[in-house]
Image: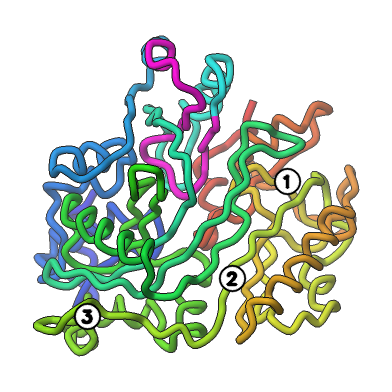
Amino acid sequence: GIPELVEALQALPYSIAGVFGGSEPGVELADRIANALAMPTANSLELLEARKDKAEMQEALRRNGVPAAEQFKSGDLQELLAWAEKRNEWPLVAKPTGGAGSDGVYFCKSLEDLKFAHGQIIGVYNPTGKVNSEIALQEYLDGDEYIVDTVSHEGKHMVVAMWMYTKRKGLPWDDKAIIPLQNMLLAPTGEKQDQLADYVCKVLDAVGLRYGPCHTEVMFTKRGPILVEVNARLHGLQGPRLIELSTGISKATYAADVVLGGGDLFHKLYQEERPGRYLYPRLKQCVQLVLISGSQGYLRVDIKERLASLRLPSVVEILPAVEEGGFVNRTRDLPTAAGSVLMVHESMEQIKADTAKIRELEEAGDLYEVSQEPFQNSQAVAPARSRAASLESEDGAQAGRIRLDSFEKMDALWAEMNSSPAK
């Protein structure tokens, strides 16, 4: 438990200066350890649920007069169906209350879709290592989705990057899927950016985040910004590095400053007693592209080598989720993506041209040539399986979950949690 862990940490020959979660599974643990160690930059546990439960964070907004999504929370299928039927406004979005990223998020157009989503979510381990027991069934927020990256110190908040989050709803192989296509770094100010910054600061106050980094997803609807979810952590994958390449300062640097460094950089940049707010410099255009596979099987080609051979000017790093000989899933959400490509360039037109070439390869099937049989160099598929991938395995072939978001060694974690294949 926490007391034993804290005792072990205190026995180490180090002085602990601060604690924060590196990725979603560590958010709750980091808060509990920071409080147990009486860290000066610990966030109060009183509102911990509002920072990690996707339904409770919406209720926290409502209690504070901040616009929030209409929703119903339950693990009982009949209760969920009754609420949806009475409301009778479709579509709805079903998501595990304690999930991470787009893992287990379903786009429901009917009661039958909701039944399907319930069967895929409840009783399944999510990336935080817990079994899903409840669903947040929420109104479909129609509009563009944005990401607001912030750091906070002493209850004051500073926006260090804003992104436009392009998603696709429905795929040829799964019409219920919601898959992110890319994140694009925005200019630091503008009509929508200013509204987003103001709204997110109110959200952070409502959920009790006074210190540390946060990665907040917001939908810009007809009634203005509405929260999708708060992620009290760094931007996933190589997000901190992308922010550095584009603005000159990594989000990891900002986070270390407010958690460990007393907020020296924060106070230098924060517009205290000055008009306006801090506007991060956008030195270069930036896109984080998500790779989408329409194939499922054992990879015949190396994704990284294939993309590198194109010599695309804006590509700074290729991060495949599956190596040659490994098992690739048909992409349904971020956890089943084939990887990502980091793109930074002075010209957005160059980034768009490079993106088009990558999508052409995907659509032609040239990037994900697969075999239904493993190769001699194929590693055994981990027991931890994507439920989405298992739906493809009509012939009983093994279907493994690939690396999840920025979670390092997640395959090993899932293997420990699951000792038998998903049914």
Residue at mark 3: 260
Quadrant in the picture for residue 138: top left
Residue 387 horizontal/vertical position (percent): 62, 34
**Residue 287, numbered label:** 2
- Is 362 on the left or on the right of 61, as rendered? right
Q: Amino acid at mark 2?
A: Val
- The residue depicted at 66 percent of the width and 47 percent of the height is 382
Tell me which segment is drawn in magenta: 84-107
Residue at mark 1: 329
Residue 58 lies, with reference to residue 48, above or below; the image says: above
CA–CA distance between discs 2 and 3?
Answer: 30 Å
Q: Pointer 1: residues within 10 angstroms few (<14), some, or many (20+)?
A: many
The answer to whether one can see residue 16 in this image is no
Task: Classify mark 3: helix, strand or loop.
Answer: loop
Mark toward the viewer: 2 or 3: 2
Marks 3/1 in contact by CB < 8 Å: the verdict is: no
Residue 184 horizontal/vertical position (percent): 54, 67
Quadrant in the picture for residue 350: bottom right
Residue 296 horizontal/vertical position (percent): 80, 44
- Is 9 on the left or on the right of 167, as rendered? left
Q: Amino acid at mark 1?
A: Asn
- The residue depicted at 65 percent of the width and 77 percent of the height is 317
Task: Classify mark 1: helix, strand or loop.
Answer: loop
Residue in front for this viewpoint, 77 or 11 = 77
Q: Amino acid at mark 3?
A: Leu
Residue 235 horizontal/vertical position (percent): 43, 66
Residue 363 falls within the magenta-colored stretch: no
- Colour convention of the picture: rainbow
